[in-house]
Amino acid sequence: MASGPAPHPGTRAPAALARELRAAVRGEVAFDATARALTTMDASNYRRVPLGVVAPRDAADIAAALAVCRAHGVPVVPRGGGTSIAGQATGTGVVLDLTRHLRSVVELDPASRTAVVQPGTVLDDLRAAAAPHGLTFGPDPSTHSRCTLGGMIGNNSCGSHSVAWGTTADNVHALTVARYGGDTLRLERGAPGPPGVRELVAAHLALLRTGFPALPRRISGYALDALLPENGPDPARAFCGSEGTLGVVTEATVRLVEAPAARALAVLGYADESAAAEAAPGLLPYHPLTVEGMAADLVREPAGLPRGGAWLFAETGGATPAEARAHAERLVRAASADAVDTAVVTEPAGQRALWRIREDAAGTATRMPDSSEAWPGWEDCAVPPARLGGYLRDFRALLGLHGLRGTPYGHFGDGCIHVRIDFDLLTREGVARFRRFSEDLAALVVAHGGSLSGEHGDGQARAELLPKMYGDELVALFARFKDLWDPEGGMNPGILARPARLDDNLRFDVLPRRPVDVAFGYPHDGGDFSAAVRRCVGVAKCRTEKAAGPSVMCPSFRATGEEAHSTRGRARLLHEMLAGDAGGLITDGWRSTEVRDALDLCLSCKGCRSDCPVGVDMATYKAEFLHHHYRRRPRPASHYALGRLPLWLRLAVPLAGPLNALARVRPLAALAKRLAGIAPERGIPPLARETFTQWLDRHRGARPGPGGRPALLWPDTFTEYLTPGVGRAAVTVLEAAGRQVLPAGQGLCCGLTYVSTGQLDLARRVMRRTLGRLGGTPGDPVIVLEPSCAATLRTDLPELLPDDPRAARLAASVHTLAQYLEAYAPDWQPPRLDRPVTGQTHCHQHAVLGDAAERRLRERAGLTGELAGGCCGLAGNFGYERGHWDVSVACAEDQLLPAVRDAAPGTEILADGFSCRTQLDQLGGVRGRHLAELLAEGLEEGRP
């Protein structure tokens, strides 16, 4: 390995460094535990603790920060979206967070098809700016909704369309770059670059002309061949893929490509992945936009795919839908001899659904079918496409030889394979096997003429093994190139040149080796809270700033734009909390104020449970944390007032009239809200004068329902005490469907409010009492009208009482009204309402229960239109708590309120959740209604 500057140990006076940075830059400078914890990891297996984080406001700030860090001898790590998979976005010095301010598309010129962007520009923002001109940026990693152009340049990112439009390096025209110390260079074709680089190239022409394998996805090492005279020279291209080790991009001029007006997707099924890989090169002469491959072990649920054990996704484009479809059908005919089955998908919704499976693979592949963990590390090797089939067979054999499992997928048309492997990175023996496998796989890739990295860079995961691919002489040249750019070795040391060992700095090293004592069962993580927290691998889908379709995650990040208020950020803080003294950042465990403050703005919407590709469940982690954090300590007033709401409502209902009158007296209401920890902006909902079960008893006495099997209706707290009209409407619907309605029991409570405030001992007591009061026989279906209560019964109940078989039986019996009607009254015809609807699917329903039955019931009733995704922002107790008003309003303004304001006159507003209806009323002055209310109204209108 080449010698040269050693990585900096870091300043011994971080306080002085922080002071000088604050004096030198206009952006934010943070050296606190939270800021550092949020940037210890990217999406890789590695963890390095920085000294602090700087969020520069402009290029001058970047230069100033680099100058101060050089004066202190402190390394610098440029960081974009933090989704790098090889460890290159972690570091021990100062992290430059380029996503907070430097995110503008500075200029877009449709005539020249170029755009000037800042390094923190999110790819989807650039694509949105280019779309009105019929243009796009060609490279499109699966993280396109949160990755940045600066990060893409640093890693030379590619994406699924690289067979048509190439890598990021192929689409970069010019760069402005700041070096360690602050001086800047303009890199474009023919420019010299730093002093000495031209002479270095001239002295090694033969090596540079013969030392690089010719394949479309050669990302490993420095692209020194771009500096050959016959290639420009092109220093901007050579800078791409340098992983922050040479300098910091302050501005980039990139090329745009023409976006097809219409697209179609040919989905080709094959017997296995090797057959799909061998077929992929045969599609390239037909000029598809993509040739993506994945095998059946990555598809965890029915997805509308044609028959086969593996599939190719070949996207085609055209000026019209017919032209795109004809192109796709030509591909299908060309593949018919080898394919088991085929399909052509032209509907945009169908294409999005299939692409989501592929794009979420970086997350879903982190869990094997048996729920065991799988990790990156050998995520994206590439070989010549014609050799991919043989390589995959050899790769599978090598996995078996080492006793490992993985799920390959990726860019088959370019010969690039992604895979997560079930490495044991928690034990010394497992880490040793990780090293042996890495060395053997590097040799296998080289034997097939490939590149150790085909997309995500070398980072710490592969750079140590670059001599196997390039030989010692060329790797030594890499180090000399790095030294010409960065003589003092301050830019991202330990990455690419003179790299750290691939088994050092593993992020698991600091975690406890034995399970911690917790309240929830964590059945999908073996009862281990550490394993649950490890689910977050950093792919950062929670950092998406615009929710797509029905997606919910992560409303607090979209409201604040702060990493600490993303699902990933909270998971990082929990990771550091579990690390404790071994991590050196958060050492007070469950008492941590850093974790408490980050979780404070978590709405417990459960969106991450379904939308996160790896199923992080931050609502559960928050409840767990609050349970421990406040154990044997006073809680916030809102926990007593809102967390024990069922108790207070039961006591208050006999006095509903006087209490409602008092609540309308503003000074008294303000005092009550102050004492209860409720936001002063909130209105207090009126209590029902007659509870739902009181009405139901009266109703059954006055008019017995139809005979036959009774329907058990859960009298949830909100329906019982606040909106009994929803329950009455459900009874009308169920009786029309031929069912006699009975309450599921007396004095029932699912425990929702206790869980959401972390009062888990009380929650379990309430749940056990409820299980003892249930009516009916075990296994009888139970209809729950309030989605949050249904979700609590379906998930929190069995996870808090894992040893009580009654909990599992009740969880399995829970149905929404639509699910019950579909399963137990399939022949019932709802009234035809024939009107448009808007509103919102409750976030808990989206995350836990799904809304497929509701969609079908609305369709049968003639209710047209889509409901918004996201979260209403009230989210049970969250929006009522003091200090949450602004975030609550911002969440409502994300999707729900705009959807309602944009609705045509006569549109019905649907909101099955009490929180959603309350938010609509208090913020929009709009009455939202439960689906049961609309159906009951239609039934009443249809009666003589």
Image (spheres, helix red, strand yellow):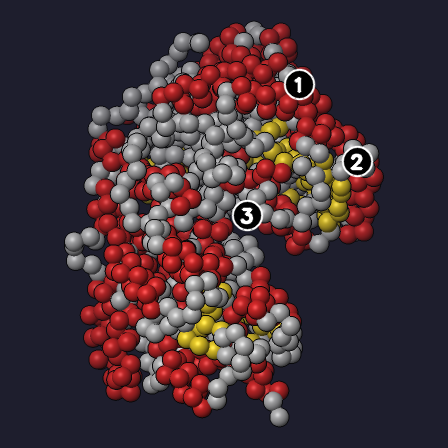
The residue where tag 3 is placed is: 125
Quick one: quadrant of the N terminus?
Answer: top left
Judging by the rendered image, the residue that carries numbered circle 1 is 214
Look at label 3 and name its amino acid.
Asp
The crowd level at tag 2 (other Cα within 10 Å; few <14, some 14-19, many 20+) is: many
The crowding category of the residue bearing disc 3, from other C-alpha atoms within 10 Å (few below 14, some 14 to 19, many at least 20), is some
Q: Given the image, on which type of amino acid does mark 2 rest?
A: Ala
Q: Residue at x 46, y 36 (%)?
A: 372
* Residue 335: numbered disc: 2
Query: What amino acid type is highlighted by mark number 1?
Result: Ala
Q: Is residue 931 above or below residue 275?
A: below
Residue 875 lies left or right of residue 762; in this view the side is right
> Looking at the image, which is closer to me, 477 or 940?
940
Q: Is residue 657 visible?
A: yes
Which one is earlier in the sequence, the residue at label 2 or at label 3?
A: 3
Residue 755 screen position, x and y as percent: 32, 58
Looking at the picture, tell me which residue is in the foreground, 120 or 783: 783
- Asked if marks 1 and 2 touch (Cβ < 8 Å), the reply is no
Quadrant of the frame with the C terminus: bottom right
**Alpha carbons under labels 1 and 2: distance apart:** 27 Å
Residue 592: x %, y % from top left: 23, 45
